[in-house]
Image (tube, rainbow, N blue to C red):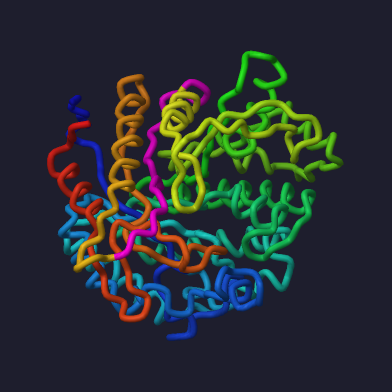
Amino acid sequence: MAIIQFPKDMKWGSATASYQIEGAAFKDGRGLSIWDTFSHTPGKVVGGDNGDVACDSYHRYEEDIEIMKDLGIDMYRFSVSWPRIFPNGTGEINPKGLAYYHDLVDKLIESGIEPMCTLYHWDLPQALQDEGGWDNRETIDAFVNYAETMFNEFKGKIKYWITLNEPWCISFLSNYIGAHAPGYTDLQLATQISHHLLVAHGKTVKKFRELDIEGEIGFAPNTTWLEPYSNKQEDIDACRRENAYFIEWFMDPVFKGEYPQFMVDWFKKKGVELNIEDGDLEAIHQPIDFLGINYYTGHVARYKEDEGLFDWEYVEMGYERTDIDWPVYPEGFYKVLTYINDRYGNVPIYITENGSCYNDEPVDGRVKDAARTKYLKQHLTALSRSIDAGVNIKGYLTWSLLDNFEWAEGYSKRFGIVYVDYITQKRTKKDSFYWYKQTIANKWFEF
């Protein structure tokens, strides 16, 4: 058995998102979001599920914070529902929405838990979508205004801010693949939206600096890693394109002030060209204080002509798979982190999401989710390797604190370390919860 040790000053936490846990979708002045619309559209979500009630954390947040205190986390990452603050995206502020987040943040601080706030985790106000959503540059201005409101309202309380969660999902998954709200299938649209998101991020960071807010700000891209099946150049290039779809496409503009040319050229081959206005790249290229990294899965792949957007195919390697059918590939986690460190320098990194889907049910009041604990051990070992390799890891926040509304999968997939009975809303701490609690307390584990 090996002892896997972590730095004493590394932060530990867990994460959630507003539409996935809050519920109270039509309460206290909250406006409609695109996920209200999408989830209520027949055929879009497994089982016809929606986030109307979810985990009812809007009413049960104090109970959830007690669970966090028992877990012993240093930091809790949550997101704000934009339409709970601005029901129409702009205009009148909803005071009851602000009051809810003040109560949540105050209770976290009182409990010794550092709030990490994500400003946008996919629940765009429907009123803005009706005007073109992220394809409309006015949405950029609306987002900066919303962010400024939050910065001013919570200065001194919230010291860690994330502008956007998973811009790849907001743009390509939602507007090209069409699996998430608003559900479009237009590559040109999705690619342009990816650019507008980065402009919104950059302008928000600039506003944060102008306001001289105490604290740190970054963003949280999702990542994956395709390992080339062979050393053939065509396999290497195919995997590089797919990895860059998540990494370079969103990080190069932030850290280098430009898009990766090989990706720009590839998109042109597909008939797609960005409309970049004067000043956009300068706006995006704002120094950030930390980078959030979300990682779940990866695979081995090789070149295959005319296969998908980037001409590659998976090669089945017999990896274990989670209950959402994603390969368990901790090596990819190490590869992502060291690649980012090599490419962009010693940027401080928080792992803002890492976790697994296993649908174990309670038996005699206990949830024996040994596979999730194994997943956590494997990925935390990869994280320890990356720290030893010189990656500047500041914290690790597992996804997710609670089983919750898993977007297009509805309530059919469970990622939590706490089981939620969606009928009674009873919370049951899983075996993985107790393992993670012990690891947080010790700063090490045996593997």
The residue lying at 39 percent from left, 45 percent from top is: 354
Viewer-closest of 51 and 352:
51
Specify whether 295 is left or right of 183.
Answer: left
The residue lying at 42 percent from left, 53 percent from top is: 357
Asked whether residue 67 appears in the rendered view, the answer is: yes
Specify whether 189 is left or right of 83.
Answer: right
The residue lying at 64 percent from left, 37 percent from top is: 245
Counting the numbered discs, the total is: 0
- Residue 328 drawn at (x, y percent): 44, 39
- Image quadrant holding the C terminus, namely top left
- Image quadrant holding the N terminus, namely top left
Is 189 situated above or below 106?
Answer: above
Is 108 situated above or below 264?
Answer: below
Viewer-closest of 434 and 244:
434
Specify whether 377 is left or right of 164.
Answer: left
Residue 345 colored in magenta in the image: yes
Specify whether 140 is left or right of 114.
Answer: right
Q: Quadrant of residue 153?
A: bottom left
Q: Which residues are magenta?
A: 342-361
The residue lying at 52 percent from left, 44 percent from top is: 222
- Residue 356 drawn at (x, y percent): 40, 49
Secondary structure predominantly adopted by residues drawn in magenta: loop
Residue at far left of view: 442
- Residue 379 drawn at (x, y percent): 35, 36
Asked whether residue 207 appears in the rendered view, the answer is: no
Viewer-closest of 31 and 227:
227
